[in-house]
Amino acid sequence: MHRITNTGRVNLGHLFWLRSLAIIGQLVTIAVVQAFYGAHLPLAAMLTIIALEILFNALTWVRVARAQPETNLELFGQLWVDLGALSALLFLSGGATNPFVTLYLPSLAIAAAVLPWRLMGWLALFAVACYSLLTFSYVPLNMEDPLNLFEYFRIGLWVNFMVSVGLIGWFVARMSRALRARDFALADAQERLLRDERAVALGVQAATVAHEIGTPLSTIAMLSEELRDSVRHDPHLAPYSADVELLEQQMTLCTSALARLRSRATGPAPRQPLDDWLHGFVEQWRLRHPHVRFELIEAEEQKRAGLFLSDPVAVGQILTILLDNAARASRDSVTLTTSASRHLGEPVIQFDVRDQGAGIPAALRGSLGATPVDSTQGGHGVGLYLAFSAATRLGGSIELTPASPHGTHAILRLADTSAPESREKAARTGRGGVAGSVTTEKRA
């Protein structure tokens, strides 16, 4: 049998509590009919049936405490017992003339929603058979005053209607909420799958390009060494010494980027203290944009927090993309601010990248990061798309907002996923969560 694993659906725990309420209602109804309507019911037989229900419900609770997924056959058996107990009590209290006979319907409504159609069909046939027998064979209600029979029937119909409305309304509302949650989760999973497929495709292309440019870079490196030697020995080439040095620096950046790509493919990067990694990263990034005015601001709480990056390569790739975009938007002023705080008891590191450029056009704000788009600066939005994907994979988030008075404010938030439970939480939250690759340790 297939197992019922959707927590939004009715399970054994729900049936246990519904049966508990039904038992209480049965006892109250018997007491009220005996005390206020002068009915003479076969109490011994009815209380025996209720006692068996209590025993069965206690066994159900033991089964619920095992915390194992129930099967469809188990749910079928539970509902079959409920219908059988209801039929037995109705047989002893008027049969089909009892106003509570329509309590078959809520149980069948629940069964129709949670059971396969074959099991539901058998349960419906059982209910129809029981109802049909109760129209011919039952113990009539025996009341001291026959006039009370109409009043009992009227009040019973009202109570029965309220109970049926409450049960069916609760169940339908719960099922609707579960279906909405399932549809949202399915749409979210499809969106993540599409985003991951695009990221994988771009990653394959990046690996192919990195393989292809290896040989040209080696050739350029060899030529740059020859140029360096020529500058040293030829006085006429001395004015080009700074240009050759800049060329060698850019070559170093290219080769180091390829080395990081190869190390990323062979295994995870080692953890690094945030403070030590940050300054090395900033020095390397400034070689990429030597003409950009750059400022690094470190908050005091970050220095005291002792944060470690579990995946410094991925974090560096994200920040490189954000800072490159800021540098292309405004060479006059690019600011990187780092700060640390705690979110839901976990350490959180925040990187704020600000520029003084023209800002993001309103038409692009909704699509940036969700899919590659052509920008006003000639780019295609691939880097920013990869940054969002990488931040999501780390369980973090990126937020793009207009800066004051102009420009763009990019915020990268990451938190601790070094513990197994944190990694599981990050995987569950998926997009937009504040969980990432930052850990906290005391320094010696």
Image (cartoon, rainbow, N blue to C red):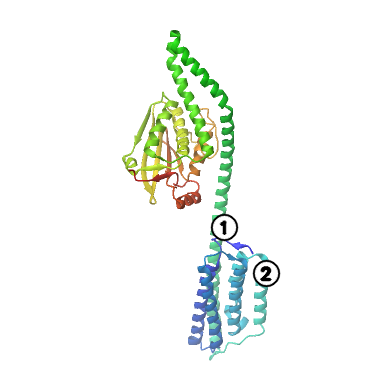
Observer-nearest residue: 62 or 178?
62
Residue 162's tag is: none
What residue is shown at x 56% (from left), y 55% (from top)? 182
Counting from the top left corner in percent of width and height, residue 380 is at 54, 31
Q: Is residue 59 left or right of residue 116?
A: left
Determine whether label 2 and label 1 are within 8 Å by CB: no
User: The C terminus lies in which quarter of the figure?
Assistant: top left
Density class for disc 1 (Cα within 10 Å; few <14, some 14-19, many ≥20) is some
Counting from the top left corner in percent of width and height, residue 83 is at 60, 76
Which residue, given by chain and number where applicable, does mark 1 sit on? 179
* Vertical position of residue 204 compared to residue 106: above or below: above
Density class for disc 2 (Cα within 10 Å; few <14, some 14-19, many ≥20) is some
Amino acid type of disc 2? Gly
* Vertical position of residue 94 compared to residue 422: above or below: below
Amino acid type of disc 1? Leu
What residue is shown at x 55% (from left), y 80% (from top)? 52
Q: Quadrant of residue 194?
A: top right
Q: What SS does tag 2 mark?
A: helix
Counting from the top left corner in percent of width and height, residue 371 is at 55, 38
Which residue, given by chain and number where applicable, does mark 2 sit on? 121
Residue 355 seen from this side: no
Residue 136 seen from this side: yes
Q: What whole-number distance in Å separates the C-alpha atoms at marks 2 and 1?
A: 23 Å
Observer-nearest residue: 94 or 435?
435
What residue is shown at x 49% (from left), y 77% (from top)? 24
Mark closest to the chain's N terminus, 2 or 1: 2
Q: Is residue 158 left or right of residue 344?
A: right
